[in-house]
Image: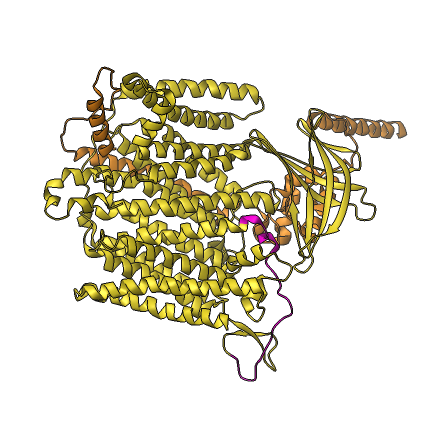
Chain colours: A yellow, B orange
Amino acid sequence: MIPDIGLIALVIAFGMSVYATLMAINGEWSQQARWVASARNATVAVFGLLTISVLTVVYSLYVMDFSQAYVADVSSTAMSPFLRITALWGGQQGSVLFWAWMMAGFVAVVVLRKWESNAALMPYIIFVAMLTTTFFVGVVVFITNPFTKMWLVPGAKDLVIAIFQPANGQQYIPYNGSGLNPLLRHFGMIGHPPTTYLGFTGFVIPFAFAIAALMKKDTVSDLWIRSVRRWTLVAWIFLSIGLILGGRWAYDVLGWGGFWGWDPVENAMLMPWLTGTAFLHSVMMTEKRGMLKRWNILLIILTYSLSLFGTFITRTGVVGSVHAFSKTALGPAFLVFISITFIGAMVLLMSRWNDLKSEHEMESILSREAAFVLQNMLFLAITIAVLWGTVFPLITELFTETKITVGPPYFKQVTGPMFMALITLMGITPLLAWRKQSPRKLLLRLAVPLSGSIVAAIAWALLHPKSQLISIFSMGMVFFVIISILAEFWRGTSIRMSTRGENPLLALIKLVMNNRRRFGGYIIHLGVVMIALGFIGDAFYKQETQGTVSVGESLTIGEYSLRFDGLESYMGSDGREIVEAKTMLFKDGQPVKELRPRRDYFVVQEQPVSIAGVLSTPAEDVYVLLVGWETVSNQSSTFKIYVNPLINWVWIGGFVLAFGVLIGAWSKSRGNGEATYSLKNRSDELAGVVPVTQVSTGD
Amino acid sequence: MSKIRFLIIFLLTALAALLVTVNVLAQDPAPTTAPLVSISDNDVNLVAKKLYCPVCPNTPLDVCETKACKDWRAQIKDQLSQGWTEEAVIDYFVTQYGERVLAEPERGGFTSLVWILPVLIFALGLVMVWLVLRSWRSKRISQPAVLAPTPASSGLSKSLLDKIEAEIRKVD
């Protein structure tokens, strides 16, 4: 009964999305405002209906209604209520519904919030956003429906999965479900998938704005670009948090001692993040200097298309093999939709090419503009390199019938130097002025960070005598950025202190609060270099050892040694057999922490999961895995120990980054926003067109 | 005659011993001179790291936990203790299971494309950046240059500072 309500709501939601899409564009063409208003109402209704649909799935999972094929597939009586609810996004059908629901939520928020301020663009925004939503809801209804049941049909080899009863079919209701993939049974389940989805789906809003502006031929007014920047920031921060949580999860669960494996699924998330980051920078060029308009629209189109591509990769299993592509209709449907989106948007951009001229030109190569262009190029080059490495196995399989692997060595070697160049730019660009920078002044401002970072790098080299040159250089670059950002904080604070006599803390707070965007950006940069520290530690300073020891014996790595004290095995609560080792970690002969690395074996799924014993400090993590044991006597075990320097900074950097976004994006007071450069310069021509209040609330 | 034969055998044996000694000294100063060296898990992992599990998607062989991968690691251990070189082991795996076991695609043949394109893209990107910057400069509108903001000297009134800050915020 309850699932039927969800199914009906879902089907009506599909009809309503089609209606909203058509009505929006129809209303605009025939200039009938009430039709557009009707499209808006339908848009909000779609979100409501999908909410009902999502809630019914959650309910079925909670009460373990195993008559539902999806519930039987991803939940089981052994799972806790928390995990059962998160199983909403634990399988394909549920996750695509969840996805469509989030997208509809974003669109509903936009039509309600921007109804007044972006009235002219609204029909097109609804059209573009609801067209996409229609696609996703359609996929849920017709291709991966979460409301299917299982049927026993005489003569059929397997259970028939369908919504309606097949001829002679008899419904099959299993006693218990098979349960969630063991790797997903983790607290991270609550964080990583929803934030990632929010990031992916959130990019539909900037895309809808940009396409709407192109369709409306309203790209000159720049009003839309401010909305776009804000919404991109929303999607971007969710995607960033999703990436970091995903890394943390991999580190905790996958048991290989790392947090980023350049797996295709990870790359799928990274690519829109890269182009989105490029956009968030280059959009400043449009806001302040009226430059790079075409480029920005191109970046929005790319970011959104790459989000779709990411969904395609993660949801169709195409990366495993090209042959997985056509197993369901999902792959072809996605491919067609991505192609239409990308090609359609590009054609539209080309047709408006001449309307998007730059208003200003540059005066010197030594200027912030030039640094931004270089930075954008690097981001795009990294994106292309990652995309190429991700799809290359498919290309090889298609053309040479050979399966190959493109693993981390490729990505590290190809993107590493470009990421280092970006970090260098991160230290220099904030010191550059727009238009033109006097070299002498730049050198003066660089003096402190540059000399400071050289001293720090030498100190680092002395402390880590076995370092390669490249790793010392990388650390030096990170120090350079940190010092250069801290110097900016210090400079501003000390000026306030001397001119206003404020105490240091007050001066610092006021400095940041009065220049939120700028200093929020610096804080985000600090977060990013902290994450870079983790990557440098992983790339250059990681140590590992593996060995078999008997009870009482120790395994040594660097200054650490691990004593094996015994093994015990017991049954876990949700159908797992646990083997846990008792070990004591020593540093320089002194006991530091008792670690209990374990191996959980999920009997039903026949899947082992390693849970590491970890000593975590800001300097390094000691990550101990139980790899094997002597089964008869339990007297000897094999351990693998990783020493992961600086890895904690990845998570700390994540928090700093999120904090920076909060500082930078929280508008101080609505209606008192910063005017854009081009708006300011053309305020006289705009005065008669756009009411002033409308200009300032456009964020 | 037998003396000469004895001499030849003696010389050859001595030469072989010398060669072995030099070889061992040159290669490894460690005291392991036995022909069947004991291979540690770390030696195995060093090789396994460069390989991918032939059956599981995207899993390096040194961390893969399936039974099959354990057996493969045991096989690497056997091969290494029989004196196989790392290259020999890797070649063996490529012959047995195909190129997909290589973590790093070969820099030759079709797969060299994966390495070449990013370099080309980067070079092309630099050229594009240069062209864009040059075109902007040549078309530039002559306007008085705005210099980098200089630190304000003290002595300004608070209201004036507030005004300046408000202006800066607008531009920033």
Q: Position of residue A217 (x, y in %)?
A: 18, 54
A156 is higher (above) or lower (below) than A134: below
Q: Residue at x 52, y 43 (%)?
A: A247
Quarter assignment of residue A491: top left
How many numbered marks are there? 0
Which residue is most to the right? B2
Q: Residue at x 43, y 48 (%)?
A: A387
A676 is higher (above) or lower (below) than A399: above
Q: Which residues are magenta?
A: A165-188
Q: Residue at x 11, y 44 (%)?
A: A687
Quarter assignment of residue B153: top left
Q: Nearer the viewer, residue B100 or A124?
A: A124
Which residue is most to the bottom? A168
Q: Nearer the viewer, residue A257 or A114?
A: A114
Residue A314 visible at all: yes
Q: Position of residue B95 (x, y in %)?
A: 63, 51
A374 is higher (above) or lower (below) than A16: above
Residue B117 visible at all: no
Left or right of residue A120: residue A66 = right
Left or right of residue A605: residue A223 = left
A347 is higher (above) or lower (below) than A510: below
Left or right of residue A4: residue A688 = left
Q: Nearer the viewer, residue B95 or A33?
A: A33
- The verdict on residue A617 being magenta is no
Q: Main secondary structure of the magenta part?
A: loop
- The verdict on residue A178 being magenta is yes
Left or right of residue A128: residue A354 = left
Q: Position of residue A625 (x, y in %)?
A: 67, 41
Q: Position of residue A19 (x, y in %)?
A: 30, 69
Tell me the quadrant of the picture where the C terminus of chain A can be found: top left
